[in-house]
Amino acid sequence: MGVEEIVLLNADDEAVGTAPKAASHHKDTPYHLAFSCYVVDTEGRVLITRRALDKRTFPGVWTGSCCGHPGPGEKLRDAVLRRLRDELGMPDAELTPVLPRFQYRAVAADGTVENERCPVVRATVPADTAVRPNPAEVEQAEWWTWDRCLELAGRPESSPWYRLQLAELAPLGAPLDWPDAGPGGLPPAIGW
């Protein structure tokens, strides 16, 4: 497997090139394409994860189910399904774009910056879906009630992007009720 590449964006969220992922995350991280995913089971529980302690950026923080970077030419749906397999051992899910316009910038304790256009996707799975976290990516994975997820957003051990996303997701109601925002709000750099 080659070097993982990220898709660089301009101010209009159009792709303007690629760069190696690992070498691109530093104190001047360029604006780039990413995504976040919240896995919700048919009982309304949300899979919340704690990032692996040896992750280079934001190690050990609690956050949504998984996140990642679509590769050059990769559709958002394919990127989410790839990361669900790689991070959580989940073979399939029903995907719904819920916050296609989300973007953020955050600075880690070591000065590393995240600077992303980061559409948020819900992945709906059956209640008995097995989770097999990849220890290189995920320290812990737990099924939480929505109320507990909302409480986490007020605590410092949650990721900055989680807190910002929950501020937009909370008004939408319970996770199974989040409306399908459709692919229309996705950045021009990526298809659904």
Image: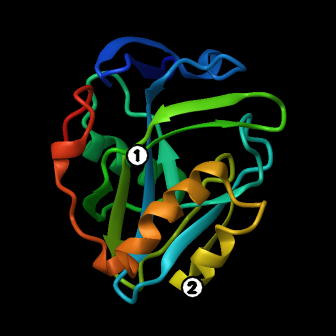
Residue 145 appears in the rendering: no
Q: Is residue 135 above or below residue 3?
A: below
Tell me the residue at 27%/60% (across/down).
95
Q: Quadrant of residue 172?
A: bottom left
State the SS at label 1: loop
Q: Quadrant of the C terminus?
A: top left
Q: Amino acid at mark 1?
A: Phe
Q: Nearer the viewer, residue 72 or 116?
A: 116
Q: Which mark is residue 102?
A: 1
Position of residue 53 measured from the top left corner of the image (x, y, whole percent): 80, 49
Residue 147's tag is 2
Q: Position of residue 67 (x, y in %)?
A: 50, 47
Say which residue appears at 38% left-offset and 76% top-offset: 175
User: Label 1 neighbourhood size at 10 Å, few (<14), some (14-19), many (20+)?
Assistant: many
Q: Image quarter for residue 93?
A: bottom left
- Kindly identify the residue that appears in the image at 76 percent across and 37 percent down: 108
In the picture provided, is 140 more to the left or to the right than 89?
right
How many marks can you see? 2
Q: Amino acid at mark 2?
A: Asp
Q: Residues within 10 Å of mark 2 (few under 14, many from 20)?
A: few
